Image (cartoon, rainbow, N blue to C red):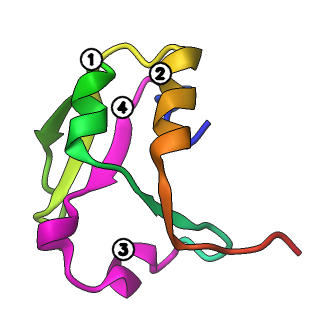
Amino acid sequence: MAFKDDRNGDPTSVYLAEEAGAWNDIMAGHEGFGLVAITAEVVGECGLSIVRQAEPGFPYHAILTGAKSDSVARRLARAAVWVIHVKAE
């Protein structure tokens, strides 16, 4: 589900790692969630695009646009590398 659009249609939210800096800022308010990294190359191979969409305090925020079928979501998940892994209690 991490690589699918929200139920309300909002596209998948991402942060540009080369610009993001401290992951603590990104994870603030998201306790209990983890953080993974995927490459722009994999995103492109899946037929998706990365579109900058800055948010207040996060100029390095972007969205993934394009059709995220189950197979695309699985491909992204397989390519993902844990940055912050939060174990379920």
Task: Kindly identify which residue carries mark 1.
Answer: 47
Q: What's the distance in space between the residues labelled 4 and 3, CA to CA?
A: 17 Å
Question: Does label 3 or label 1 sit earlier along the sequence?
Answer: 3
Q: Is residue 82 above or below residue 50?
A: below
Task: Kindly identify which residue carries mark 4.
Answer: 11
Q: Is residue 69 above or below residue 61?
A: above
Residue 18 counted in the magenta span: yes
Q: Quadrant of residue 86?
A: bottom right
Dot 1: what SS?
loop
Closer to the camera in the image, 57 or 42: 42
Task: Kindly identify which residue carries mark 3.
Answer: 26
Q: Is residue 83 visible to the viewer in this orientation of the structure?
A: yes
Please say if the residues under marks 2 and 1 sit with CB atoms less than 8 Å apart: yes
Residue 78 vs residue 44: left or right?
Answer: right
Dot 2: what SS?
helix
Q: Residues within 10 Å of mark 1 (few under 14, many from 20)?
A: few
- Mark on residue 72? 2
Q: Quadrant where the N terminus lies?
A: top right
Where is residue 12? Give x, y as percent.
39, 38
Task: Say what amino acid the circle numbered 2 marks.
Answer: Val
Task: Say what amino acid the circle numbered 1 marks.
Answer: Gly
Where is residue 31? Give x, y as percent.
62, 77
Task: Say what amino acid the circle numbered 3 marks.
Answer: Ile
Question: Does label 2 or label 1 sit earlier along the sequence?
Answer: 1
Q: Residues within 10 Å of mark 2 (few under 14, many from 20)?
A: some
Q: What's the distance in space between the residues labelled 1 and 4, CA to CA?
A: 14 Å
Where is residue 70? Give x, y as percent.
58, 17
Question: Does label 4 or label 3 sit earlier along the sequence?
Answer: 4
Q: Which stretch appears magenta? A: 9-29
Task: Say what amino acid the circle numbered 4 marks.
Answer: Pro
Please say if the residues under marks 3 and 2 sit with CB atoms less than 8 Å apart: no
